[in-house]
Image: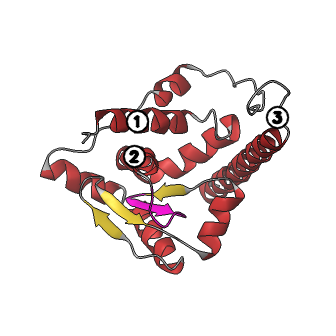
Amino acid sequence: MIRRLLWAAVLATLGAGVVGALRQRREVVLATRARSRPVAGTATAAPATTPPRQGPLGRRLAGWVPAQPRTRAGQLAALAWASPLTAVGLLVAVVSGGRPRWRDDLGCFVTEQVQGASAFALRLVGAEANAIGHVVLSRQATASPALLAHEAVHVRQAERLGPLLFPVYLWLSARYGYRHHPMEQAARRGARQAIDDAPTG
């Protein structure tokens, strides 16, 4: 009985992931169409979408930008808790022809110019990069600071949620799509903060 319930939960979560990916792909298609057919008198028209209503949890997650652990013990605990995701991320990076390099400033591995299935999946949903545990996978040959700052927020989220990040993200993706996904909103907010706080000159 318990095994059946677990399988049902896994299949439902994977189904939620498919729904989320389809919603994200639809957003990409609508945005592309809007850019190719601008409304007269405007630069480029963004697709008009009504944001889904967020409950208290969604609103909290939309503002959740965790900080990088400061103590050595905290860093080790975060690495251990997110290690199942990180192992998958490193495997995907190697299979994608990338060379993961550790970045102390971001507290994660960065793999640029991924190819193969990983690049295809990112392109399909209109993404330049994604984070799997402590591994950032980027289609760009040189990932921009803004992109890396965005993905670093997802790394911090993985440090807090560990393997739970996967089902949480997929279910929220099915509910909100990409643009209004609370964890993506938090990543955009965190990236803006990081760029604003970055030293200039």
Q: CA distance from mark 3 to mark 2?
A: 31 Å
Cα distance in 3D space between marks 2 and 1: 7 Å
Percent coordinates x, y for residue 147 in the rendering = 46, 49
CA gap between label 1 and label 3 equals 31 Å
Please tell me the numbered disc located at residue 46.
Answer: none
Horizontal and vertical percent position of residue 61 = 48, 30
Q: Which residues are magenta?
A: 133-143
- The residue tagged 3 is 38
Classify mark 3: helix, strand or loop.
loop
Q: Secondary structure at mark 1?
A: helix
- Give residue 122's position: percent from left, percent from top: 63, 60
Chain-order first, disc 3 or disc 2 = 3
Residue position for label 2? 149
Answer with the quarter of the image where residue 135 lies.
bottom left
Quadrant of the image for the C terminus?
top left
Evaluate if marks 2 and 1 touch, with contact meaning CB atoms under 8 Å apart.
yes
Out of 196 and 156, give the one closest to the viewer.
196
Q: In the rendered structure, which amino acid carries the disc numbered 2? A: Ala
* Residue 70 in the image: above or below residue 108: above
Residue type (three-letter) at the residue carrying disc 3: Pro
Q: Amino acid at mark 1?
A: Gly
Residue at image mark 1: 190
Q: Residue at x 60, y 69 (%)?
A: 118
Q: Residues within 10 Å of mark 3 (few under 14, many from 20)?
A: few
> Which callout, 1 or 3, points to the residue nearer the camera?
3
Q: Is residue 166 left or right of residue 22?
A: left
Q: Nearer the viewer, residue 122 or 71?
A: 122
Is label 3 in contact with label 2 (beta carbons under 8 Å)? Answer: no
Q: Earlier in the sequence, mark 1 or mark 3?
A: 3
In this picture, is 19 found above or below 177? below
Q: Residue at x 45, y 32 (%)?
A: 189
In terms of sequence position, does the residue under pointer 2 or pointer 1 come before the other? 2
